[in-house]
């Protein structure tokens, strides 16, 4: 029998439901307490920490993280905040926030019940073709759960479709699926780095159900005209808001609707709209040996359907929505498509003279970028600053202040492609490839001596250093072997160790514009191919008869007779004095 059919999964009751908590509401209470802390809410005994010191005993007095406390403790604190509100308006504001989190948790619980029921569908009843088969394939993607089942629709400003039903419900109730294509235009504002500025929704026949320009919240920082084709004059008379678009989507999207898009999760986040089921065409196709890559919509349409997109060279959200839908329809007939060979497109020779630097904070000075290629900075094994012809990028300093909360990128242009290649080779850092198989390195960028930057600037640099280091560690695995005396990490920076300690540095990514032979997309992602024999020392040894010391016969690494000398000694042996 179908579970929970009579339960609505929308937001109708959110504004009128009673604020009552139980043991099952622990997750909601944690979020509520955190939001109250962020808003600076005060109960009868002050903020959350003060309330803990006044009401709890032992170590619990010091547990600032709400998740460590029992649900009853959190519920008691929330009750004191609601009761101690300064006026009716503040009280209603906290009540509305609590209802929002409670409603989301109960909705998510019902959604999980539907998912569990879908999961026990007999194999013989599961659709093997058609739109529901693509929904199933999308759901099998490793990133699906993190992307589509974790949309933060408990946050203010988010909306959910009225009713969400799994494929099994539609099958048992003879409800035919309707595929609806979605594509959005995004810009950056001072309130949202990916704010909605345009949306297009089309049906299976290519009919336009919705096409609107949207007034983004806050001040526009970057309209991304090179992508969207929009200018400020295009938005001069626009009055449509995000809430208007969400209301229109709720009228279009029912339990029979499958939203379709290429990288659809980004569109849903811009729309702040939560809906399942979905078909993400970016999750249906992949390039051979490039597991992290996402084949482009234009390349897929050209290769599989012999259709050229963007003939006029500009992005059109209606066209993208239609083509994602056409690609899904094509796959229902001809799929599943096996792994594709990466395209052999070549990079424009004019771009081969550049290196791409990214994951750096906004406000980074051009001199700091040039310094990456300086022998004196210690980040490059040879001097290549003189080979640099120019630096091109947005949001660079000093025109823009240093902002560690947002990142930017830049192109460093060299005199020739050979100069760019030599500069990249000389960089000291963990080597790897990006998702498209293009070589890149995690490199230290020296900003300034710690004493030279004061106050908030130093604090911002410190937080940037930490955040960027974490990102680069997630992105790139070092190929260096600690036992390799020729490792680039052994090459010394110039200057004294004391100067290096004082220097404020952060890790940025430097990437070549092309893979081998000038290809726009490489053939191997080194960071994800440890077992194919393509990673040198990272290849696993073959199993064989063991020797007396337990190592595989014939391949055992001899133990080091003497301890490895310290770094300074190894450098001195190479004739390098630090």
Image: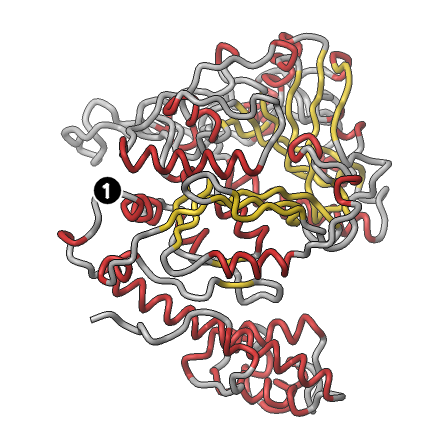
- For residue 326, what is the image quadrant? top left
| In-front residue for pair 13/207 | 207
- For residue 32, what is the image quadrant? bottom right
Residue 386, placed above or below residue 252: above
Q: In the displayed structure, does residue 329 sit left or right of residue 388?
A: left
Return the x and y of residue 418 as percentages of the image width and height. 63, 7
Return the x and y of residue 258 as percentages of the image width and height. 39, 51
Secondary structure category for the residue under label 1: loop
At x 52% / y 84%, what residue is drawn?
17
At x 50% / y 80%, what residue is drawn?
69
Q: How are the residues colored?
A: secondary structure
- For residue 514, what is the image quadrant? top right
| In-front residue for pair 60/221 | 221
At x 49% / y 59%, what residue is drawn?
274
Q: Residues within 10 Å of mark 1 (few under 14, many from 20)?
A: some
Q: In the displayed structure, does residue 382 sit left or right of residue 161?
A: right
Return the x and y of residue 409 as percentages of the image width and height. 68, 32
The C terminus lies in which quarter of the figure? top right
Q: In the displayed structure, does residue 137 sit left or right of residue 317?
A: left
At x 39% / y 45%, what residue is drawn?
279
The N terminus lies in which quarter of the figure? bottom left
Return the x and y of residue 495 as percentages of the image width and height. 75, 27
Q: Which residue is mark 1?
A: 129
Q: In the displayed structure, does residue 561 sit left or right of residue 451?
A: left
Q: Is residue 560 visible?
A: no
Residue 147, placed above or below residue 436: below
Residue 144, placed above or below residue 492: below
Q: Is residue 393 visible?
A: yes
């Amino acid at each position: 029998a179908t579970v929970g059919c009579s339960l609505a999964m929308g937001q109708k009751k959110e504004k009128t439901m009673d604020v009552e908590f139980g043991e099952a509401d622990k997750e909601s209470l944690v979020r509520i307490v955190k939001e109250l802390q962020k808003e600076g809410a005060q109960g009868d005994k002050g903020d959350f920490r003060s309330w803990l010191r006044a009401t709890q005993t032992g170590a619990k007095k010091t547990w600032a993280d709400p998740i460590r406390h029992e649900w009853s403790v959190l519920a008691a604190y929330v009750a004191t905040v609601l009761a101690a509100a300064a006026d009716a308006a503040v009280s209603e504001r906290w009540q509305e926030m609590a209802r929002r989190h409670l409603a989301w948790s109960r909705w998510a619980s019902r959604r999980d019940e539907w998912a569990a029921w879908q999961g026990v569908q007999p194999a013989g009843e599961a659709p093997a073709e058609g739109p529901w088969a693509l929904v199933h394939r999308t759901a099998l993607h490793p990133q699906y759960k993190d992307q589509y089942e974790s949309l933060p629709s408990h946050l203010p400003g988010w909306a959910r479709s009225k009713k969400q039903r799994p494929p099994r419900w539609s099958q048992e109730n003879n409800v035919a699926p309707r595929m609806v294509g979605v594509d959005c235009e995004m810009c950056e504002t001072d309130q949202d780095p990916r704010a909605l500025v345009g949306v297009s929704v089309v049906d299976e026949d290519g009919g336009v159900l919705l096409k609107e320009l949207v007034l983004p919240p806050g001040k526009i920082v970057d309209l991304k005209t090179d992508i969207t084709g929009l200018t400020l004059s295009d938005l001069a008379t626009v009055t449509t808001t995000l809430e208007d678009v969400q209301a229109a989507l709720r009228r279009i999207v029912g339990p029979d609707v499958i939203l379709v898009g290429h990288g659809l999760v980004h569109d849903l986040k811009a729309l702040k709209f939560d809906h399942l089921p979905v078909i993400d065409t970016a999750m249906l196709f992949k390039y051979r040996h490039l597991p992290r890559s996402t084949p482009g919509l234009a390349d897929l349409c050209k290769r599989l359907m012999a259709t050229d997109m963007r003939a006029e060279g500009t992005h059109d959200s209606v066209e993208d929505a239609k083509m994602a839908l056409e690609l899904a329809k094509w796959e229902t007939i001809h799929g599943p498509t096996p792994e594709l060979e990466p395209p052999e497109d070549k990079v424009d020779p004019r771009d081969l003279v550049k290196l791409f630097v990214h994951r750096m904070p906004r406000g980074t000075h051009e001199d700091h970028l040039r310094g990456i290629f300086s022998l004196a900075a210690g980040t490059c094994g040879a001097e290549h600053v003189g080979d640099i012809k120019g630096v091109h990028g947005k949001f660079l300093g000093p025109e823009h202040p240093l902002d560690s909360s947002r990142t930017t990128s830049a192109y460093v242009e060299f005199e020739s492609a050979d100069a760019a290649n030599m500069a990249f080779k000389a960089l000291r850092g963990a080597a790897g490839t990006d998702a498209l198989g293009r070589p890149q390195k995690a490199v230290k960028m020296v900003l300034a001596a710690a004493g030279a930057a004061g106050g908030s600037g130093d604090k911002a640099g410190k937080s940037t250093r930490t955040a960027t280091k974490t990102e680069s560690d997630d992105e790139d695995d070092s190929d260096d072997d600690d036992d390799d005396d020729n490792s680039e990490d052994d090459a010394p920076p110039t200057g004294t160790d004391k100067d290096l300690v004082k220097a404020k540095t952060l890790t940025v990514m430097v990437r070549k514009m092309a893979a081998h032979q000038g290809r726009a997309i490489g053939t191997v992602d080194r960071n994800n191919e440890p077992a194919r024999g393509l990673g040198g020392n990272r290849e696993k040894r073959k199993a064989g008869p063991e020797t007396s010391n337990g190592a595989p016969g014939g391949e055992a690494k001899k133990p080091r007779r003497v301890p490895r000398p310290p770094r300074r000694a190894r450098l001195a042996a190479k004739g390098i004095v630090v």
